[in-house]
Amino acid sequence: MGAESSRPGEYEEPSLPEGVFEVRISVYYLDMTGVSILNSVGAGLTGAYHSGLVINGDEWSYGGHDQPGKSGVYKCEPEVNPDYQFNQRIIVGRLQARFQQVQRVIMATAGSPDWSGPQYDLIEHNCNHFASELCWNLLRRRPPEWVNSTAESMARRRRRSRVEKEALKLAMASYRSRYAVAAASPSADAPGARAFSDTFTNTFELAYQHYRDEGLFGKALEAAAAEKVEYSQEIIDFSILPRDAEDIVAERRHEEKQAFAVVVTAAKTAAHAVASAARQASAARAKQPQEGLQAWDAAWARESAPLLRDWKEAAVFGKLLVAFSEAPVPGTPEAAAHAAREQQVQAALSTAAQEASDAAEGR
């Protein structure tokens, strides 16, 4: 079973036993000029689709509006939604159920606050998400990944940006609370704050790219979207639908959440290590002769660069041990790692101080 050919609206369902319903997905091209809610996105959604679920002669879809408490779910004649251009139909299964059971599932899904009109989001909560959810509630099956792959790819990038911004905001608030000092200028930041922020951002990107290449972000979805899905013709009995069926959508979101936690931890770990070095460097620089500052800056940049690079890389691979404190518990692996970094920093600062002294003395 799968996509079938015939003109839109002229498809004839097969003759099925009483109480057996064919379930299919109507897929439409997304018309960027025909639906006002999409106009702001424009042609950026190349390959994007609208979809609705068809059962018992009705096509159920989801759209947005600004009326709180009112569902965004609506129905129309199958394959002839006037707002879109029909592309194809996908037959996903046959369901054995009483008509009342089918209606209850549809009404319960449509009546959920999750599917009210104001909850609609073109990227993260759209018509394809609804069709997929209704399909799952009826059959414990999902439509093919390609139907919503364009929006999902954009949603993944949006989630990445959101996670990074929220995590950095929380991490910076914690850092500033810990290291804030009384300053003459109200605009003065905590020492090392700039290094913390920059390192967090850089390491987040490095870690995200690394784990994406490992398949934790997007590659599995992209591979699934490229696969042709064949649905079996078996009749699924609604009364014995498994409650614990493996849901690839929920599983993927869970894995993504775990992967983001790893990325955030890497970013925070590297940021704390680099900010600690930055605080020491700031204090050391303040003690240098004015004539030697240029030499000190150049030497510190040269000597510290490989250290910072190695720490970031270690953080990405989960090998940078940081206690998030200036006083790690003695005897712990974190304390030993902290001591090793301190030696590296002090060696770099010593070299910078010597070159600053030489420059100041004209040597």
Image (cartoon, rainbow, N blue to C red):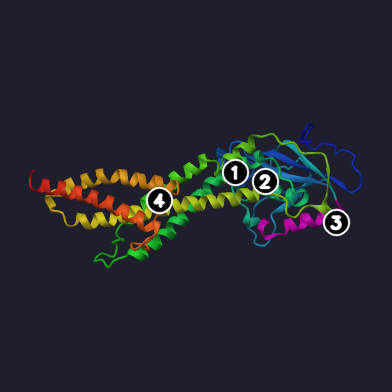
The amino acid pointed to by label 2 is Asn
Question: Which disc number belongs to residue 100?
Answer: 3
The amino acid pointed to by label 3 is Gln
For disc 1, the neighbor class at 10 Å (few under 14, some 14 to 19, many from 20) is many
Question: Which disc number belongs to residue 320?
Answer: 4
CA distance separating discs 2 and 4:
42 Å
Look at discs 4 and 3 and give the one toward the viewer: 4
Rendered-image quadrant of the C terminus = top left
> At which x and y percent is residue 266?
44, 51
297 drawn magenta: no
Q: Secondary structure at mark 1?
A: helix
Q: Secondary structure at mark 2?
A: helix
> At which x and y percent is residue 83?
69, 43
Look at discs 2 and 4 and give the one toward the viewer: 4
CA distance separating discs 4 and 1:
36 Å
Tell me which corner region of the image, top left, top right, bottom left or bottom right, holds residue 194: bottom left
Kindly identify which residue carries mark 2.
128
> At which x and y percent is residue 114?
66, 58
CA distance separating discs 4 and 3:
58 Å
Q: Main secondary structure of the magenta part?
A: helix
Of the numbered discs 2 and 3, the one sitting upstream in the chain is 3
Kindly identify which residue carries mark 1.
151
For disc 2, the neighbor class at 10 Å (few under 14, some 14 to 19, many from 20) is many
Rendered-image quadrant of the N terminus = top right
CA distance separating discs 1 and 3:
33 Å
Q: Which residues are magenta?
A: 97-115
Look at discs 4 and 1 and give the one toward the viewer: 4
- Farthest residue in the front direction? 331
Of the numbered discs 2 and 1, the one sitting upstream in the chain is 2
